[in-house]
Structure formats: C-alpha cells, structure tokens
Amino acid sequence: MGIEIKPSDLYYRYPRKKEDRDLPKFCGKPDPRPFDRYDLYEVIPMFEAVMDSLASQDQDLLQRIEENLDKIPAFIDTREMIFDALLDGVKDFV
C-alpha cells in the first residue's frame, strides 16, 4: 500500500502550487522530469517513495530526509536524481 505523508507530518512548510497540483507526480524510477523542491505537491510523493523504499515510518527519518533535500545541489534536478540522492543520504540511518 505505501506510506502516506500529510502536510502536518512535515517539519518544514512548502508552498502549494495549485496550478501544478493535477500534473503526474513521482511514482518511481525512471522519471527524468524536473523536480520542484519548493512545491508541496511534488515533495510529498517524493518523500513517500523514499520512506517506502526504506520501509520506515519513523518521523525522525522523515525530518532527516527533509533536511537532506535542502542540501542537494541545484544541478541535481530530475526526479530520479533527487530520489537517488535522498535515498543515499539517509540509508545509513535506517
């Protein structure tokens, strides 16, 4: 089924870009489309995918994933690259 993350579960607040809300979101690799790290509707599916991959529901891990997103350089901009970077950044904490 998968992990469901609500906006209230997140440590940081993200803008909601309503005009992009209905566009397809990240649902797994491969996905070469650009990732908008400042859109709540993009961030939640990405975090859910990472948490599912790690088979974890730990709130501290979710916060660590959020912190790592902020540290990823801007040139890493596709959904699959962001997914890999987030996964690599926290896999040692699981």
Image (cartoon, grey):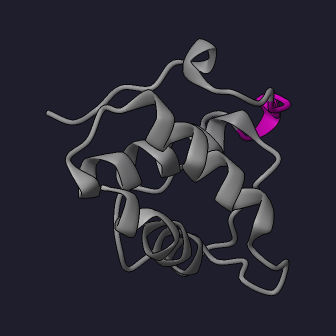
Residue at the location (35% across, 47% down)? 51
Region of the chain picked out in magenta, as a range: 14-20
* Furthest residue toward front: 93
Question: Measured along the vertical axis of the image, is residue 16 above or below residue 93?
Answer: above
Is 5 in the magenta?
A: no
Q: Can residue 44 be seen?
A: yes
Q: Nearer the viewer, residue 53 or 23?
A: 53
Q: Position of residue 94 (x, y in %)?
A: 30, 55
Q: Position of residue 42 (x, y in %)?
A: 63, 46
Question: Is 22 placed left or right of 5 in the picture?
Answer: right
* Furthest residue toward bottom: 75
Question: Is 85 placed left or right of 92 in the picture?
Answer: right
Residue at the location (72% across, 83% down)? 76
Question: Is 25 placed left or right of 20 in the picture?
Answer: left
* Furthest residue toward left: 1
Q: Nearer the viewer, residue 30 or 85?
A: 85
Question: Measured along the vertical axis of the image, is residue 80 above or below residue 36?
Answer: below
User: How many marks overall?
Assistant: 0
Q: Quadrant of residue 30?
A: bottom left
Residue at the location (49% across, 69% down)? 83
Question: Measured along the vertical axis of the image, is residue 19 above or below residue 32?
Answer: above
Question: Is 41 placed left or right of 86 in the picture?
Answer: right
Q: Can residue 23 be seen?
A: no
Question: Measured along the vertical axis of the image, is residue 80 above or below residue 35?
Answer: below
Q: Position of residue 24 (x, y in %)?
A: 52, 50
Residue at the location (56% across, 81% down)? 81
The quarter in which the N terminus is drawn is top left
Q: Nearer the viewer, residue 54 or 35?
A: 54
